[in-house]
Image (cartoon, rainbow, N blue to C red):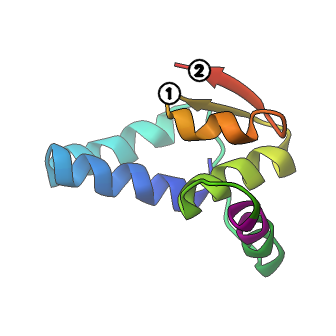
């Protein structure tokens, strides 16, 4: 999971639920078998290229670029990802 997307989940939980639950998310994330990855300049450009080509949020472009780079699955329920489902493996929730 890209660190940009960790931040996205964090601020969504903090805003919609509470800051305490957002902090609990971080603790829980550490216990899950999910690798958190950082970004190099090349990674930022890969996400920017996806964003330029497809109608997704910038954070979603990081999720797609990370999945491509790491050969990972994108788990989502967001219909915006339909535009890029030919690029990565999607698991729809």
- State the residue position of label 2: 92
Is residue 90 within the magenta segment? Answer: no
In the rendered view, tell whether residue 26 sits above or below residue 74: below
Residue furthest bottom as drawn: 41
Q: Where is residue 56 shown, x and y percent of the image?
A: 59, 53
In this rendering, the count of numbered labels is 2
The magenta region covers 47-52
Q: Where is residue 30 shown, x and y percent of the image?
A: 49, 42
Dot 2: element: strand
Instruction: Report crowding for label 2: few under 14, some 14 to 19, many 20 or more residues within 10 A (C-alpha).
Output: few
Q: Where is residue 58 shown, x and y percent of the image?
A: 57, 63
Dot 1: element: loop
Q: Is residue 27 left or right of residue 14?
A: right
- Residue at (40, 49) in percent of width and height: 9
Could you tell me how far apart the alpha carbons at marks 1 and 2 are, in whole angstroms? 5 Å
In the rendered view, tell whether residue 41 sits above or below residue 38: below
In terms of image quadrants, where is residue 55? bottom right
- State the residue position of label 1: 77
- Residue at (50, 27) in percent of width and height: 77
Q: 56 or 39, which lies in front?
A: 56
Q: Contact, CB < 8 Å: mark 1 with mark 2?
A: yes
Is residue 50 within the magenta segment? Answer: yes
- Residue at (72, 71) in percent of width and height: 48
In terms of image quadrants, where is residue 51? bottom right
In terms of image quadrants, where is residue 88? top right
Q: Where is residue 37 shown, x and y percent of the image?
A: 68, 57
């Amino acid at each position: 999971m890209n660190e940009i997307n960790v931040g996205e989940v964090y601020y969504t939980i903090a805003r919609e639920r509470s800051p305490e639950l957002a902090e609990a998310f971080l603790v829980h994330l550490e216990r899950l078998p999910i690798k958190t990855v950082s970004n190099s300049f090349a990674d930022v450009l890969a996400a920017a290229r996806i964003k330029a080509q497809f109608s997704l949020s910038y954070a979603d472009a990081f999720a797609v670029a990370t999945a491509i780079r790491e050969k990972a699955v994108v788990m989502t329920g967001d219909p915006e990802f339909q535009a890029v489902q030919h690029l990565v493996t999607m698991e729809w929730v």
